[in-house]
Image (cartoon, rainbow, N blue to C red):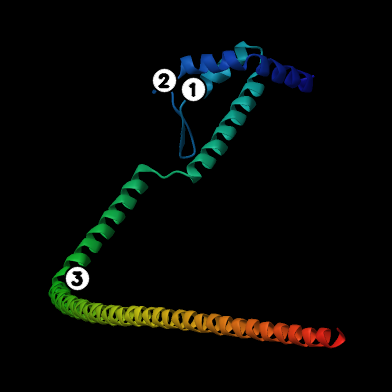
Amino acid sequence: QNAGNLSAGKITFFFFFTDVSISVSSLQSKENISLLGNRRLYFDTHALVCLLEEKGFTTQQSEVIVSALVKIMNSNLDMIYKDMVTKVQQEIALQQVMSHIAGVKKDMIILEKSEFSALRAENEKIKLELQQIKKQVTDEINKVHADNKLNLNLEKSRVKELYSLNERKLLEMRTEIVELHAQQDRALTQTDRKIDTEVADLKTMLETHKLDNIKYLAGSVFTCLTVALGFYRLWI
């Protein structure tokens, strides 16, 4: 019978849990804070037991339910407290951090005072070295620029000389070509004249041979006629 009553009480607890929560919230007060060990419970457990009894639970069932709620709350709080710190711990940690920061500041001040002069001297030394390097680089650049300019001027002069030499050679070649053309023209003229003279001589020779042939033929004809007339007279 007690087991049946406990089961019925559990079912009734689940159905009326919302009403119980609302009633518990309305029954909370600062004067009715129960203690469990060293941990405070911010609700009235006795009022919750009375409320459960009003809902049909027995006193033993109500105390068991409240005890279970307290254990669940303690377990949840333990899990939450694992990832949390108290205000005192937070203040201690803050003091430690501030102390560490103060120590770091003190060390920085000491370091600054002890090494500032050395750093400044090193900085000045590096600055002078950089200025010297800059001067050397500038001198090298100016030297290279001057050398390039000189080489460029020399190259321009050489190109101009080559151009003038090529112009002179071209002019000489043109003169030689003109002279060759003139010589060829003179040679052609002389050849033409010689050919004309030889042609005229050949024509004269041909005319002479033609006249000689005509004379020879005429003599031959007269000779033949004379012989023929002689034979004719002999036959008559």
The residue shown at (63%, 20%) is 59
Which callout, 3 or 1, points at the residue further toward the start of the chain? Answer: 1
* Residue 103 figure quarter: bottom left
The residue mark sitting in front, 2 or 3, is 3
Would you say 3 lies left or right of 20 here? Answer: right
Would you say 229 lies left or right of 79 here? Answer: right
Which callout, 2 or 3, points at the residue further toward the start of the chain? Answer: 2
Between residue 7 and residue 90, name the one nearer to us.
90
Residue 48 point in image, percent of width and height = 55, 19
Image quadrant occupied by the N terminus: top right
Between residue 235 and residue 132, name the one nearer to us.
235
Label 2, secondary structure: give it.
loop
Give the labeled residue for mark 3: 111
The residue shown at (78%, 23%) is 3
Q: CA distance from mark 1 to mark 2?
A: 7 Å
The answer to whether mark 3 and mark 1 are in CB contact below 8 A is no
Give the labeled residue for mark 2: 29
Q: CA distance from mark 2 to mark 3?
A: 59 Å
Categorize mark 3 by other alpha carbons within 10 Å: few (<14), some (14-19), many (20+): few
